[in-house]
């Protein structure tokens, strides 16, 4: 951390007594700071993309304004974000599902967002649009596929996949405020209930969050039962969740390797066999 950043933080926290690394820092390092004025969480990145932490701060503030519990933002700089420490509490999956449904009841007539946001260190274009199929295929799948070194035959299969899923995406005409990166590690349980962290907000199909939450271990059935009791599943919910899992799998393929790409391929190929053009 830059000396100037630490000095700015210590003006708020007081001198640091202990620094403990926390889990979940594959993109940015995350630490618990025990300081004179209390415990804090410090998220930092040595060489963040432009506006990286400003984007996360804006997304956390957006969730908070929608009534969703998030950590308190203490201060932020170009290379860090300082937040309140969330002391662990009991798992409350039903309450978390209810909170997500509440978030998804925040609606917009268009998909997208007022600014671009980051998923990991990848800038997500969020120019507002009225057609969800165009937004998801052009502003989510296409940029991530472009980061992979794919042969022309593979690219052609992805084009066919886009043609196959477009009619299903075209049926989505209600746009909810999304967390945008809701894998299970971004849902904490504090002393007062669930707390959502590390968002990448935009307006889109609420099933995007549900689909991602089922990856990488998934959440418990109480979470989904609570959510769907408030926002009942649509006829095509299962199909669309498979489509929406492709994007985070491609992102992980870029970051972590071919095993995740194979999972995305499997979803694509199943669609092309059963529903292909």
Image: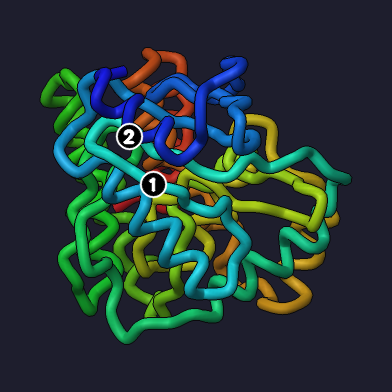
In the rendering, at what x and y percent does residue 98 appear? 73, 69
Mark identifier at residue 75: 1
Task: Please name whichever residue, 108 or 225, is drawn nearer the observer in this view of the structure.
Answer: 108
Q: Residues within 10 Å of mark 1 (few under 14, many from 20)?
A: some
Task: Please name whichever residue, 267 or 28, is drawn nearer the observer in this view of the structure.
Answer: 28
**Of the residues under marks 1 and 2, which one precedes in the sequence?**
2
Q: In percent of the image, x 37 and y 26: which residue is there?
A: 44
Q: In percent of the image, x 27 and y 39: which residue is there?
A: 77
Q: In percent of the image, x 63 and y 65: which residue is there?
A: 100
Number of marks in the rendered image: 2
Residue 120, above or below 69: above
In the rendering, at what x and y percent does residue 263 appear? 48, 27
Task: Please name whichever residue, 139 or 172, is drawn nearer the observer in this view of the structure.
Answer: 139
Q: In percent of the image, x 21 and y 55: which residue is there?
A: 116
In the rendering, at what x and y percent does residue 131 appear? 24, 74
Asked if residue 187 shows in the view, the reply is: yes
Residue 23, above or below 103: above
Task: Please name whichever residue, 37 or 28, is drawn nearer the observer in this view of the structure.
Answer: 37
Q: Secondary structure at mark 2?
A: helix
Q: Which residue is mark 2?
A: 8
Marks 1 and 2 close (CB-CB < 8 Å): yes
The answer to which quarter of the image holds residue 26 is: top left
Q: Quadrant of the N terminus?
A: top left
Residue 20, above or below 135: above
Left or right of 83? Residue 113 is: left
Left or right of 214? Residue 144 is: left
**Of tags 1 and 2, which is closer to the observer?**
2
């Amino acid at each position: 951390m830059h000396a100037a950043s630490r000095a700015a933080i210590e003006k708020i926290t007081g001198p640091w007594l202990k620094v403990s690394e926390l889990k979940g820092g594959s993109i940015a390092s995350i630490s618990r700071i025990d300081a004179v004025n209390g415990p804090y969480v410090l998220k930092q990145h040595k060489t963040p993309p432009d506006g990286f932490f400003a984007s996360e701060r804006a997304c956390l503030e957006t969730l908070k304004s929608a009534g969703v519990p998030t950590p308190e933002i203490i201060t932020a700089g170009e290379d860090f974000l300082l937040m309140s420490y969330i002391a662990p509490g009991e798992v409350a999956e039903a309450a978390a599902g209810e909170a997500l449904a509440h978030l998804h009841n925040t609606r917009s007539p268009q998909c997208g967002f007022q600014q671009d946001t980051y998923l990991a260190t990848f800038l997500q274009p969020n120019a507002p649009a009225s057609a969800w199929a165009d937004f998801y295929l052009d502003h989510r799948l296409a940029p991530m596929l472009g980061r992979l070194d794919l042969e022309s035959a593979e690219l052609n299969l992805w084009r066919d996949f886009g043609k196959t899923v477009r009619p299903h995406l075209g049926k989505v005409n209600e746009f909810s405020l999304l967390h945008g990166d809701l894998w299970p590690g971004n849902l904490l349980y504090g002393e007062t209930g669930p707390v959502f962290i590390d968002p990448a907000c935009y307006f889109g199909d609420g099933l995007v969050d549900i689909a991602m939450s089922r990856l990488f271990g998934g959440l418990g059935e109480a979470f989904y039962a609570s959510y769907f009791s408030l926002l009942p599943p649509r006829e095509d919910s299962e199909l669309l969740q498979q489509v929406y899992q492709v994007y985070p799998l491609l992102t992980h393929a870029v970051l972590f390797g071919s095993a995740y790409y194979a999972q995305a391929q499997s979803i694509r190929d199943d669609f092309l066999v059963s529903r292909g053009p």
